[in-house]
Structures are given as structure tokens and as C-alpha cells.
Image (cartoon, rainbow, N blue to C red):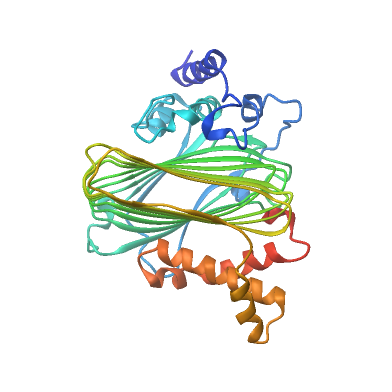
Amino acid sequence: MDSARADILAARHRLDTRGWIPRNAEAFRHLPPPAAEVWLGGTPSATACATHPLAGAGWTLHPIGHGSHGRVDARWLDARDALQRDELFAGLPMPGGVDDAGDSDAAPFAWAHRALCQRGLRLRIGGTSGAERGPSDTVWLQLRHQPRSAVEAPLLVIEVLAGVHCVLVETHDRQELACQQPVVQNLQAHIRLGEGATLQHLRIATPGASDRIAHHLQARLGPGARYEHALLASGSGYHLQRNVICLHEKGAAARSAGLLLAADAVLEHQVRISHGATQTASSIEDLVLARGAARAVVQAHTRIAPGAAGADVRQGLVGIPTGGQPKLVLRPHLEIHHDQVQARHGATWGALPQDALFYARQRGLDERSARRLIVEGMAGALMQRCFSDDRLVGALGIEALLRDVVARHLAPHAEAVHG
């Protein structure tokens, strides 16, 4: 038996012996995930749906505009091959370990991923191939993913080398040219930033109405590194976005912003940030729009360790029901083990402010246009606060994107694919 097969069997044995996420697990008690069999393709409804990479499925890498897109080493690896599997998983933590960010809650997802993973992509950004470029150059990349199978477990590993500045747009959507039936996807992404590196990361996840999706992103930052992560996500049959960010080196900083849209669908965003060094900073902001019978959950958890003097932490969660009777849960949480820190958090839930609607109507707008204008402004301000470079929002066309998704969500008969 080769080592790849042995690793797969060991992962399945771990799931069999330790069990799946219990329904009373604190991190998942509001929206319990489907059973392990769903993520392993063991349910009767799991039928074959294989799509060739030449049809646009899997990971595809594209440049953005005229920005620098050299200095990138990309390796597409087959996890069924022993040598390639070793390279794909090299340096990644084994599932089930307890770290300061508390990601052990989701360990069964990681074991299921390891048991099913067949393909992955490793990106190394800032290699020697671009030595002729100056250290201040920005690498601009777009990474697209289309499902290749009805049940899949993609893997993405990104390493940004010391001093490199990268802008990455990562999109997950559904097109007819890929798998055309409901998809089950358990994705794991690992991001490592070297000393002084910066990654500005826009992620767009718009699954099909019946898809069941779980994306797990783990980021670990070096000294003085900066990670700015903006998520735009819509609901589906089950949709989990779970981000774990470790700030365990001096001066590391992270910003997380989420625009979540759920219409008669399920959507959960979990963000866990761990401060384990001095002079670290983080912020978590989410804006949730929910309508119909949607169920949406946002959980923000920030931990400040005993040695994290000078940490600066902020959390702000906002939920807006836009019609019907959605169920919305907002849970900000701070865990502080040091006195010399700055920390603030809050959550608000409710309809759009009437005074803002009144002033918008005074400008000659009908109520629907006024609501759309106010929500667009809130979403735009959220993205501006996430990205430290104001020009980035315009360069990536984020304003037009926000206008489109907000209009679709607020439309009387919103398309199901946009949650």
C-alpha cells in the first residue's frame, strides 16, 4: 500500500473513531453542519459529476490588468500520487491539533478533507524569478475555482514571501460549463505571510441554491506582516465560511470584512483571531442582509494571549432584515488575558434607519431605490475600511460588484443563486 492510500485510510479511521461534529458543539450549535457522509460522498444522492480542467474546472490562475504578475510559482498537485501528496501537504498542521485560535472545533472537517482530497494548488509568491523587480512592486493575481466533482475537497496553499505585496482576487461561483448538479465542497486554504509581507485578499463565494459548501481558511502571519481579507458570500443549502487568523509575531495585523447575503438560504461566517505577540492589531466587521426564511449566523471570536501587550482589537457586526422573517444570529466575543490592550466590540440588528430613508426620499428617490442606495453605501464603506489602499476598491471594480449583488438581493424576486 502506498503512503497516499495509507494517509486516506488513516483519516477515515480517525473520523470513524472520533466521530463527527456533535450537534451541541458550541461553534456550530446555531447551524449544525450536514453529517460526515455528505462530505465524504457516502450518501445515496451523491452521484458522479466529473468535469475536465480544460472546461474551466478546478483552480485556474489569471493576471489582473497591467499589474505585475511575475514572481509566482504555481504547482497543481495530485493528492492521489504519493510524492505529489507529500509536496501538497508539506508543512501543513495535522488535523485535530489545538492551537491558540481554537480551530480544533472544526477538526472533523479537516479529517474529512484529508480523506477525500484529490487535488490541490500551491502558490509561492515572490520567488527569485522576479529578482529584477523592486521589493515595492505589487503582484496582482486572480484565482478562480469551478467545481470538478459533485463531492470534492480542494486544497489551496499560499505562501507570500518576506516583504512582498500581493493583491489576490479569489472567486468561487457556479457556471453551467462545470458540474451542473448540486455540489458538496469541503475546501481548505492555508496562507502563510513572511516578515513584512502584505496580502490584500478579496474572496467571492456564490454557490448554487442547493449546494452545500464549507470553506476553511487558516492564515499565519510573520513579524510585521499584514493581511486584509474581504469576503462577499451568498447563501445556499448549507454555506459555512470559517476563517482562523494567527497573529503570533510582533507587529502583525489583520482586517476581516464580510458582506453576507442570504435570501431563503443558509449562511454562516465564523472568524477567529488569535493575538499571541506584542503590538498586534485586528478588526472584524460583517454586514449581513437576510430575507425570507433565511438563517444567517456570524461569530467573531478574538483572543488576546497573556503576552500580547499593546494589542488593538475591534469587532463590529451589523445585521439587516430586508424582508420576510429571517433568523439572524450575531455573536461578538472577546477573550482578553492581558491588561495593556485596547479592545471594543458590538453588534446591531434591525431595519435601516428611518431618518436615512427619509433624507434619501427627499432627494426624489422611491423607497426601493433609497434602500438600495443606503445599503450600497454601507457595503462600500465596509470594503474601504478593510483595504488600507483606497485605490484598491476602484482598481478591482468592487463598487460595481457591490451595486450588482445588493440590487439582486433587494429585488422582489431575487435569483436563488445569489442566496
Residue at 41%, 68% in the rendered image? 392
Where does the image place residue 226, in percent across and percent down from the top left?
A: 31, 54
**Does 35 sit left or right of 132 as displayed?**
right
Query: Is residue 363 or residue 205 the one in the foreground?
Result: 363
Where does the image place residue 297, in percent across and percent down from the top left?
A: 58, 45
**Does 306 sit left or right of 64 as displayed?**
left
Can the viewer see residue 40 in this picture? yes
Q: In which quarter of the image is residue 163?
A: bottom left
Residue at 60%, 51% in the rendered image? 56
Query: Is residue 356 or residue 376 the one in the foreground?
Result: 356
**Number of callouts in the render?**
0
Can the viewer see residue 231 in this picture? no
Q: Which residue sits furthest right?
A: 413
Where does the image place residue 168, in percent across and percent down from the top left?
A: 43, 57
Residue at 66%, 29% in the rendered image? 38
Query: Is residue 263 or residue 143 the one in the foreground?
Result: 263
Where does the image place residue 359, in percent across and percent down from the top left?
A: 60, 81
Give above or below for 30 relative to 159.
above
